[in-house]
Image (tube, helix red, strand yellow):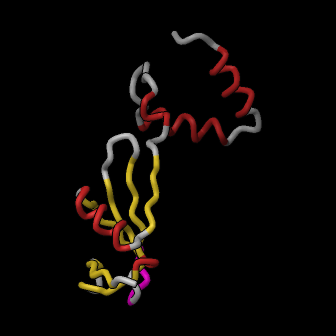
Amino acid sequence: MATIRARCPHCGDVRLRTHQVTVRVCADDDQGSYWFRCPICKTAVAHDARPEIVELLVEAGVRRQVWNRPAELSEVRTGPPITSDDVLDFHLLLQSDEWLEHVSEMVRRPPA
């Protein structure tokens, strides 16, 4: 089993076994990263990784996870951006017992 040297922001260089590291690759753009839990301070640590680092880690036996960006990132956004006033209004709306009915009506209403 290979030993991997990585850097914890709190503890500095640490040594890990392949089962302690996970490589993650985004299927949408092939961006890679790896993460581990520091064996000393137990902090979860993540680092970006160039494709050649991803390949080396996987060849050494590190498990590889492939993930996709949430579909919401591809949705077309319409309307003005949400403001802090909008958030406050929504917070106040949630204080009422009829908040669900109000929100349902907002969704049914065509945009102005």
Residue at screen point 41% across, 33% down:
83
Image quarter of residue 15: bottom left
Q: How many marks?
A: 0
Image quarter of residue 56: bottom left
Q: Position of residue 96 (x, y in %)?
A: 71, 38
Residue at screen point 30% across, 86% down:
14
Q: Is residue 110 left or right of residue 7?
A: right
Q: Position of residue 71 (x, y in %)?
A: 49, 35
Residue 63 within the segment the image draws in magenta: no
Q: Position of residue 65 (x, y in %)?
A: 46, 58
Residue at screen point 35% across, 73% down:
60
Q: Is residue 66 left or right of residue 32?
A: right
Image quadrant where one finds the N terminus: bottom left
- Specify start and end residues of the magenta stretch as a single range: 40-44
As rendered, which of 14 and 75 lies closer to the eye? Answer: 14
As rendered, which of 64 and 15 lies closer to the eye? Answer: 64
Q: Is residue 101 left or right of residue 23?
A: right
Q: Is residue 21 left or right of residue 54?
A: right
